[in-house]
Amino acid sequence: MITEQTIQNWLVEEGLFKEKIHDENANYHFIVNYPEDNVIDLLQVKGKEDSIILGCGTMVDPQQQELIKALPQAKQEKLIWDFKSAINKFLMDFQLEHPNNILHLFVITDQIFFDGLNKHSLISTIKKIFKVKLQCLLILEKYLGIVHQNPNNVPQDNAMFG
């Protein structure tokens, strides 16, 4: 049986563990830092003791939302379609908050069941979630022509589930 401590140790060994946070809905909830200044949540939901969930939520900057709002409706709809299509190609679960086709938030998640959980699958999933986030940001840049100011071209996140 893989324990909370085993998972935490794997994250620490790879320099990815940031902190453990209190979460009433989880048996445990870790904040993963991958890459630097990008937050990915890892938690075991109460009642789901046979798996962990990893996820990353990203808020779209209000200035970017205004640029999306200025796009023709057909282009707004295509942006949402391209997001959904790109995330599906990575076989990830997701939620998009996009009232009136104005993207406000996207959340990318994956679940690993304990019968398939090892250090390799954990670290690979963390990296894959980040790659999907990058793909989404590239799509946003394509539509809006925006280049971020920080060196990783990644908006800073907050904990998604906490």
Image (spheres, rainbow, N blue to C red):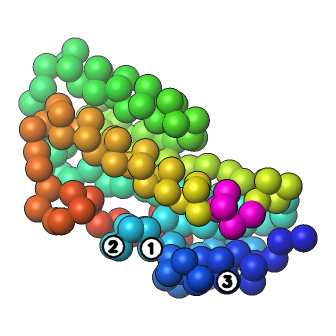
Residue drawn at the location 46% of the way across and 35% of the way down: 87
Q: Which residue is mark 2?
A: 37
Q: Which residue is mark 1?
A: 33
Q: Is residue 121 magenta?
A: yes
Magenta residues (range): 118-122
- Mark nearer the N terminus (3 vs 2): 3
Q: Residue furthest top?
A: 74
Secondary structure type for disc 2? loop
Residue 124 image-quadrant placement: bottom right
Secondary structure type for disc 1? strand
User: Up-down: is 129 above or below 19?
Assistant: above
Q: Is residue 1 magenta?
A: no
In the picture provided, is 90 more to the left or to the right than 65?
A: right
| Whole-number angstrom distance, CA of label 2 to CA of label 1 | 6 Å
Instruction: List x then y, in percent, for residue 130.
Output: 43, 54
User: Up-down: is 65 above or below 75?
Assistant: below
Residue drawn at the location 36% of the way across and 55% of the way down: 58
Residue type at mark 1 is: Asn
User: Up-down: is 94 above or below 51?
Assistant: above
- Mark nearer the N terminus (1 vs 3): 3
Instruction: List x then y, in percent, for residue 112.
Output: 72, 54
Residue type at mark 2 is: Asp
Residue type at mark 3 is: Asn
| Whole-number angstrom distance, CA of label 1 to CA of label 3 | 14 Å
Q: Which residue is mark 3?
A: 9
